[in-house]
Image (tube, rainbow, N blue to C red):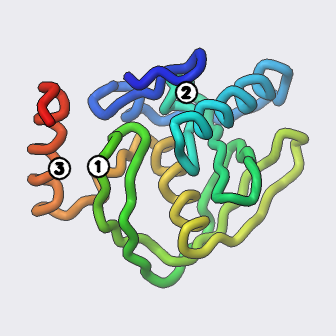
Amino acid sequence: MISVSNYPIRIYGDPVLKQKTQSVSNIDGAIRKLCDEMIEVMHKAPGVGLAANQIGIAKKIFVFDIGEGPRVVLNPEITDSSGEWTYEEGCLSVPGLFWPIVRPKVVHLEGIDLDGNAISVEGDELLGRVFQHEVDHLNGVLLVERLDEEQLKAAKKDLRRIALGKK
């Protein structure tokens, strides 16, 4: 685990990362505080997105900031996608490793904000990738599951090396 703030970021191999998260049904002070703390963890890590289960919380929440200020999405769902875009993608739960990953170029995300308002937003390239990456986390899907067979073989070797504390 990488410890940032009161919430350590869970690392590849932690079973919480493979579990599907539960919808948020009540936006209360505890959820608002959690979201503030998630933003703090994301910024300190540093990262551009963070899903709640990456800090051990099994709720459908993610935060993101691609340079336009932090945002929160509750109960996100990707409802449409198009195109294809390859980008060198990393993950706070798989620190220090990056792979060229093919994903849709444009996605449509729906969810709710902290005020209970519906969110319906289109994201392309980096923003769309962040949406897809974080929704994957909330569905228990890790970045390494998006690798092709050759990439996965090399990734497992790197992950074993890291787990053993070798450089």
Disc 3 packing (10 Å; few <14; some 14–19; many ≥20): some
Report the side of 63 relative to 150 (left or right). right
Q: Position of residue 71 (x, y in %)?
A: 74, 48
In 3D space, how far apart are the residues under numbered discs 2 and 3 (Cα atoms)? 26 Å
Q: Quadrant of the C terminus?
A: top left
Q: Amino acid at mark 1?
A: Leu
Q: Badge 1: how crowded within 10 Å, few (<14), some, or many (20+)?
A: some
- Sequence-wise, the earlier of marks 2 and 3 is 2
Whether pointer 1 and pointer 3 mark residues with C-beta atoms closer than 8 Å, the reply is yes
Hey, what amino acid is under mark 2?
Ala
The amino acid type, in three-letter code, at marker 3 is: Ala
Residue visible at 55% across and 27% down in the picture: 58
Q: Which residue is mark 2?
A: 58
Q: Nearer the viewer, residue 88 or 122?
A: 88
| Cα–Cα gap, marks 1 and 2 | 24 Å
- Looking at this rendering, what residue extends furthest in the front direction? 167
**Residue ID at (64%, 58%):** 66
Residue bearing the label numbered 1: 97
**Image location of residue 92, percent across then percent down:** 43, 40
The mark nearer the N terminus, 1 or 2, is 2
Task: Give the structural element (helix, strand or loop) at label 1.
Answer: strand
Residue 18 position within the rendered picture, expressed as x and y whole percent measured from the top left: 37, 34
Query: How many marks overall?
Result: 3
Residue 165: percent from the left, percent from the top? 16, 26
Give the numbered dot on residue 111: none
Give the residue at mark 3: 155
The answer for how far apart the CA atoms under marks 1 and 3 are is 8 Å
Which of the two discs, 1 and 3, sits closer to the camera?
1
Q: Secondary structure at mark 3?
A: helix
